[in-house]
Image (cartoon, rainbow, N blue to C red):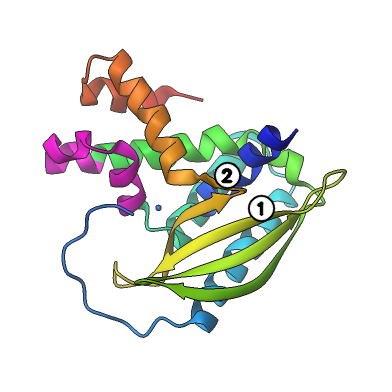
Amino acid sequence: MRSDRRQLILGAGATVLTVGVLGPQPALALNDAQARALISRAVNDVNAAIDSGRTGPALYAQFEAIFTKYADVPTIARSALGVASRRASSAQMAAFTTAFRGYISRKYGQRFREFIGARFEVEGARKVKTFYEVKTVAHLRGQAPFEALWHVSDRSGKNLFFNIIIEGVNMLAAERTELGAMLDARRGNLDALIADLKRAS
């Protein structure tokens, strides 16, 4: 049961879901109130999508739009790809990022009907090194509440979240492990992985 609910909330984060290697970025005035506000808006949009009654491709497209709006998708994609991103060309990274965004939206969107009736509460935020950690509590029907920690940064030039920790499970680490196994199965062929992510449901 705990594993199932971790997968559900990780899916929520991935959809509203992006720390990768970034060059020097201008420091912006991100504060705890802005970090909380970002996650509140993201959670509200996810709840609206869940309650919209949409299914299939229409629902996945809505999730993908939310993911793009609130998450640092290029950073998440690069971090999820791991060391393979270092040898990828610019064109490959662009293609992978697009394929990854769609893959995540479909992968977790299929389970989002299970979130109907769920409630997410933002409880507070604190500064951690160069980013803010926003604490939320998820209330799912028939399950005990559990904690989700969202990491928010302005290093991309906008206030966006780049990771979620669910009951000690790191979203980026989990996706990196899975994608690494998929890439290994294709003998390190990134183009093959990109093509398969585009087709994956």
- Relative to 73, is 163 on the left or the right? right
Residue reaching furthest to the bottom:
29
Measured from the top left, where is residue 54 in percent x and y? 69, 43
Which residue type carries mark 1? Ala
Residue reaching furthest to the right:
142
Residue 49: numbered disc: 1
Name the main secondary structure of what is drawn in magenta: helix
Q: Quadrant of residue 130?
A: bottom left
Measured from the top left, where is residue 152 in percent x and y? 44, 67
Q: Is residue 1 above or below residue 19?
A: above
Please report the bounds of the magenta region as a residue range: 74-94
What residue sits 49% from the left and 47% below the top?
64
What residue sits 45% from the left and 34% below the top?
103
Helix, strand or loop status at disc 1: helix
Q: Earlier in the sequence, mark 1 or mark 2?
A: 2
Can you identify the residue that label 2 sits on?
10
Q: Nearer the viewer, residue 4 or 52?
A: 4
Residue 87 falls inside the magenta stretch: yes
Which residue type carries mark 2? Leu
